[in-house]
Image: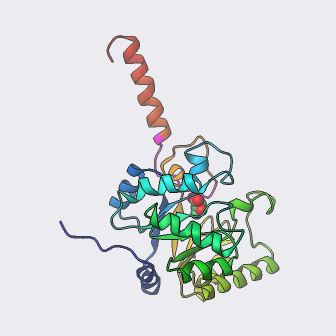
Amino acid sequence: MKKRRKITPPLLCALKRRGVPIAMVTAYDAEGGRLADEAGIDIILVGDTGAEMMQGHSSTVPATIDGQLMMTRAVSGHVSRALIVGDLPFGAYEFSDEDAVRSAIRLVKEGGADVVKLEGPRPSQVRAITGAGVAVMGHLGLTPQSQTALGGRKVQGRTAAAALQLVAQARELEAAGCFALVFEAVPEPVAEQITRGLAIPTIGIGAGRGCDGQVLVYHDLLGLLDWSPRFAKTYSDLRGQIAAALNQYVADVRLGAG
Ligand code: KIV
């Protein structure tokens, strides 16, 4: 079988230059990682959304470094081509650059992540982590770890001033060494304009089609939840299929046919 080339940060920048759209999805366990990798996904994010999708929390705030490590380990053992992004949870990088470096190194060394992601305009932490030899993906716009401070899960960068602030933050993170940026819940023209001005790729979620790639949460993509955000395109109805299978199983057992 032909060996597939491992995705790396420089390769993603090359895809941007060549105009090849980048496909990214979250995964939280071994099978999710394996299936995403086999499907040709370029970037697998072991997101802190695992706190919501896997543990039923109502936000990503309760995610912990130990929880992220457990999921990252499960995914990384079953992925060979996709770039694995370990997500730094709330509280794992804000206090100091040292803390940020320590958490990032744990995700790589103990979790098997290739690179890490952090939320918000934190150039100092980005410089510290990249200085320690770990590549960093930034995340701007709606940053769910600080959603309360942002007034809820709202579109960001709607006013001219807020859009200009996003432009400045994106440039600052690129200069600090980020190899890519996620834009979440940002108006399409703003995300598109910023994307054109950066050498590093942008990956959008609820940010329109002007980014260099798209990211979806695994459970949204597969229709595993009883709701999904308006912007999330659903490619399957796994919730319905699972419910039907479970109902059929219960019926079979009741009939003595299971
Ligand atoms: O944790 C996550 O799943 C994310 C995506 C929504 C980009 O940050």
| Residue drawn at point x = 69 percent, y = 60 percent | 144
**Quadrant location, the N terminus:** bottom left
The image shows residue 9 at horizontal and vertical percentages of 45, 79
Q: Residue at x 38, y 15 (%)?
A: 253
Q: Main secondary structure of the magenta part?
A: loop
Find residue 111 and report its horizontal and vertical position in percent: 46, 60
**Which of these two is toward me, 6 or 64?**
64
**Residue nearest the observer in this picture, 93 or 197:** 93
Residue 235 in sight in this render: yes
Query: Residue 232 colored magenta?
Result: yes
Question: On screen, 98 above or below 13?
Answer: above
Give how far across and how far down residue 100 sits, in percent: 62, 71
Residue at horizontal 79 percent and vertical 76 percent from the top: 162
Image: magenta residue range: 230-238
Q: Nearer the viewer, residue 7 or 228?
A: 7
Q: Residue at x 58, y 43 (%)?
A: 55
Q: Residue furthest top?
A: 255
Q: Foreground residue, 176 or 165?
A: 176
Q: In the visual, does 139 lie left or right of 34?
A: right
